[in-house]
Image: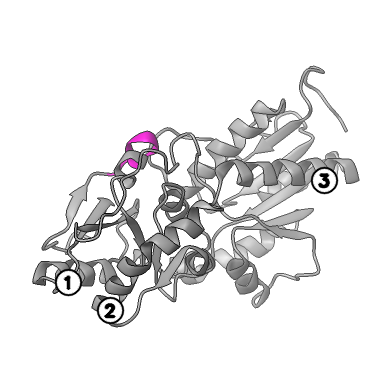
Amino acid sequence: MGRFFDSSSVATVAINLRPRAGSWGGANQWTSQVVRWFEYNGWRVVFDLRRDPDAVIMTHTGLSSHTTFGADEVAALKKKSPRVRCLHRINDNDIRKESGEMDLLLERSSRVADHTVFVSEWLRDYHASKWFDIARPHSVIVPGADPRFFHPVGGVRFEPGSPLRLVTHHWSDNWNKGFDVYQAIDELIAGGLREQPYELRVIGRWPKDLKWKSARTFAPASGADLAGLLRQCHGYVSASRFEPGAMHVAEGLQCGLPLLYHKDSGGTVTQGIKYGMEIYDDLESTLSEFAGRLPEFRKRLLSGPPSGSKMSAGYLHLVQRLLLDA
């Protein structure tokens, strides 16, 4: 396979997104976990193509200034070393970004891939309606958060009659992250509800022209700090539109928080159906039903939550299979 590192390594994989410390969005959380998992299992991980690796994992190709190589470099590598295998992770699209070039860029990048991973069935189906041939080798691996931090142990329990604390968190301040819905919930709570009291907590960033009336707000956080804030709450709300496969949702779910989701949440809908309920047009009825069914949702969630370990193991398994089939 063109191995060049010492025999103590299982193999060498090059990933084109280098992990960064702090709150840098879902892609960074993905790469941090995958790198750690590969290294724990004896693989050598590099972030460039200066020496031929055995396999390549490519993500965010051409879409981020933080990527260290792209499809052109992978194509040149494979021409020089035909046995190198490439796994392409697709986690975005034009409809979410309100752009016109991402889908085309992903299509071009995919041409060097031996296997494609989508972060949700919804995203796969979206790209299949545009350009992706589902007869090509592909998988769906949903996002999972770092289990060292995002777990339900030590979380608060909801006691009927006490305020039901809803929480959301976003690195982006784009209105499409669902801030219209969060604002409506905030105003409903500020106006007072007849039966069950509620509280909304917002972590991270929000549009500058949005003025909260009752919500408690917190600065952007990550890792243990973020998880600690999430576990102080009882339910998670995500109204982010057209999400390919949201890491913020996985973080909330893994902390034991059932999910309120918007019907246009893309890949989040599949998780919402499993672990919570849709946000109706009548917000007061939505909150009332959610409060009543919270124990049911929590029991279902804790029986099989998302997992960063499961996610990372999925990528390792696929890369290993690609090498064995080479």
Nearest to the observer: residue 110 or residue 193: 193
Q: Quadrant of the N terminus?
A: top right
Tell me the kind of residue under disc 1. Glu
Residue plotted at (54% across, 61% down): 92
Are the residues flagged by discs 2 and 3 in contact, CB closer than 8 Å?
Answer: no
Q: How far apart are marks 1 and 3 (CA)?
A: 56 Å
Q: How crowded is mark 1: few (under 14 residues within 10 Å), some or many (20 or more)?
A: few
Magenta stretch, residue numbers: 220-226
Q: Residue at x 64, y 67 (%)?
A: 124
User: In the rendered view, would you say 223 is above or below 245?
Assistant: above
Per the image, label 2 sits on a secondary structure element best described as helix
280 with respect to 151 (left or right): left
Residue neighbourhood size for the residue with mark 3, other residues' Cα within 10 Å, grouped as few (<14), some (14–19), many (≥20): some
Q: What element carries label 1?
A: loop
Residue 76 shows in this picture:
no
The nearer-to-camera label among 2 and 3 is 2
The label on residue 285 is: 2
Position of residue 287 measured from the top left corner of the image (x, y, whole percent) = 28, 71
Which residue type does callout 3 highlight? Leu
Q: Horizontal and vertical percent for residue 203?
A: 27, 50
Which of the numbered marks, if any, corresponds to residue 195? 1
Q: Is residue 121 left or right of residue 199?
A: right
Q: At x 67% / y 32%, what residue is drawn?
A: 38
Task: Determine which quarter of the picture holds residue 182.
Answer: bottom left
Q: Which of 233 and 99 is in front in this view?
A: 233
In three-dimensional space, the C-alpha distance between marks 2 and 3, rounded to whole angstroms, equals 50 Å
> In this rendering, would 262 be left or right of 286?
right
3D distance between C-alphas at marks 1 and 2: 11 Å
Q: Was residue 296 drawn as part of the magenta stretch in this picture?
A: no
Q: Report the amino acid beneath label 2.
A: Ser
